[in-house]
Image (spheres, rainbow, N blue to C red):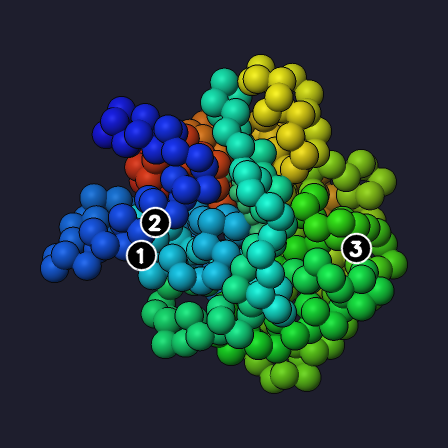
């Protein structure tokens, strides 16, 4: 149904309006008595064989909603009914910020891809904390944290610390996002020394605050092998809980969509990042020898691309662009395919 009528209507709207339209329509729909249970009965797959225990947390299934979809923690209560095993909220920054001027999200239908340069638009970490109060505890929520645009890299640690403290009691795991291409120089924080300093600081704080939370690092697909090796070394030395591979790419090779859209600045997601993201997962898995779990994300649009990430070494997977192109039934299709392989 989604790929027939609904997607055709939505793709007439600009991508950001389509996001707001769909999420608010879904919210209203779920207010109808009995609707949440009906949606769950359609989309949720429950089976012991889908359950996973990763970095000390129990997941109902390994398919998550990637960061950036629920930037403010206002959607997870609705979207968990679609059968996700977990949802990552954010990226959130200490202070609210508007992000880049619109338009800032573009469809590349011929490539089943998106380009976005949202620029961490969000209502700030205090607002997110309010959304997460009294949340259902049985459902896993990750908090993806970043820095404000106006904060220079030399002071970035402070921003991550503010978000970390504010969400400490409210999320199940943290993702340190240093890989968005849309905040100037953010990705320089992936360099060995600043990255080590940032992660070590958060890990110390984690112990100090009393009940340590898993801390994951989200990396770009554009790192070369020596940069990836640095990530491996840091992850092992600091005993990180996990790595999320990958964020969007700045690479624009082999695209077939309209050149004007391809030339838009921002991060590319969807089918074109599939292979590179899987390659990164495979490399990390081989180097880490399975000691540090990986969440695989990038270009999962069907059962085969999901299974490929798991076979490459991912313990869990996440989707974003696939949801836009394939619709919510994708989550169920993937879970069924995983079951079949089990
Ligand atoms: C519109 C949009 C916004 C995003 N915002 C964030 C973000 O705020 N933080 C983050 O870590 N990743 C963000 N991402 C990246 C996704 O979480 C994911 O890593 C990437 O899109 C690759 O997966 P996909 O091909 O399934 O979309 C965003 C992606 C899109 C398309």
Query: Quick one: label 3 or label 2, which is nearer the N terminus?
Result: 2
Q: Secondary structure at mark 3?
A: helix
113 in relation to 57, above or below: above
State the image coordinates of residue 194 (x, y, percent, origin top left): 84, 60
The residue to which callout 2 is attached is 23
Residue furthest out toward the left: 33
26 in relation to 210, above or below: above
State the image coordinates of residue 287 (x, y, percent, origin top left): 74, 44
State the image coordinates of residue 104 (x, y, percent, origin top left): 57, 40
Residue furthest out toward the front: 101
- Disc number at residue 209? none
Query: Quick one: label 2 or label 1, which is nearer the N terminus?
Result: 2
The residue to which callout 3 is attached is 189
Task: Look at the numbered discs 2 and 1 and tell me whether their residues touch, using CB distance below 8 Å.
Answer: yes
On screen, residue 330 versus residue 181, left or right, reads left
Residue at image location 33% in from the left, 44% down from the top: 22
């Amino acid at each position: 149904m989604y790929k027939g009528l609904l997607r055709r209507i939505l793709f007439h709207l600009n991508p950001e309006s389509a996001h707001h339209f769909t999420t608010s329509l879904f919210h209203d729909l779920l207010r109808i008595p009995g609707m949440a249970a009906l949606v769950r009965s359609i989309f949720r797959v429950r089976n012991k064989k889908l359950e996973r225990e990763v970095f000390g947390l129990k997941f109902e299934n390994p398919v998550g909603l990637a960061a950036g979809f629920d930037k403010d923690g206002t959607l997870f209560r609705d979207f968990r009914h679609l059968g996700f095993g977990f949802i990552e909220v954010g990226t959130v920054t200490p202070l609210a910020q508007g992000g880049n001027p619109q338009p800032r999200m573009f469809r590349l239908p011929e490539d089943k891809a998106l380009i976005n340069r949202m620029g961490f638009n969000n209502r700030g970490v205090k607002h997110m904390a309010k959304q997460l109060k009294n949340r259902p505890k049985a459902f896993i929520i990750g908090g993806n944290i970043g820095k404000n645009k106006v904060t220079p890299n030399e002071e970035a640690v402070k921003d991550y610390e503010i978000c970390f403290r504010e969400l400490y009691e409210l999320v199940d795991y943290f993702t340190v996002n240093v890989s968005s291409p849309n905040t100037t120089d953010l990705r320089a924080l992936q360099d060995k020394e600043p990255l080590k300093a940032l992660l070590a600081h958060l890990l110390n704080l984690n112990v100090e605050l009393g009940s340590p939370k898993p801390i994951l690092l989200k990396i770009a697909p554009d790192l070369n092998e020596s940069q990836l090796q640095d990530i491996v070394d840091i992850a092992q030395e600091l005993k990180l809980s996990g790595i999320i591979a990958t964020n969007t790419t700045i690479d624009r090779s082999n695209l077939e969509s309209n050149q004007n859209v391809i030339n838009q600045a921002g991060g590319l997601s969807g089918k074109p990042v599939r292979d590179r993201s899987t390659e990164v997962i495979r490399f990390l898995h081989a180097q880490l020898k399975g000691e540090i779990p990986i969440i695989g994300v990038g270009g999962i649009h069907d059962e085969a691309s999901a299974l490929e990430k798991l076979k490459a070494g991912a313990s869990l997977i996440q989707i974003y662009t696939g949801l836009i192109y394939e619709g919510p039934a994708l989550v169920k299709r993937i879970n069924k395919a995983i079951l079949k392989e089990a």
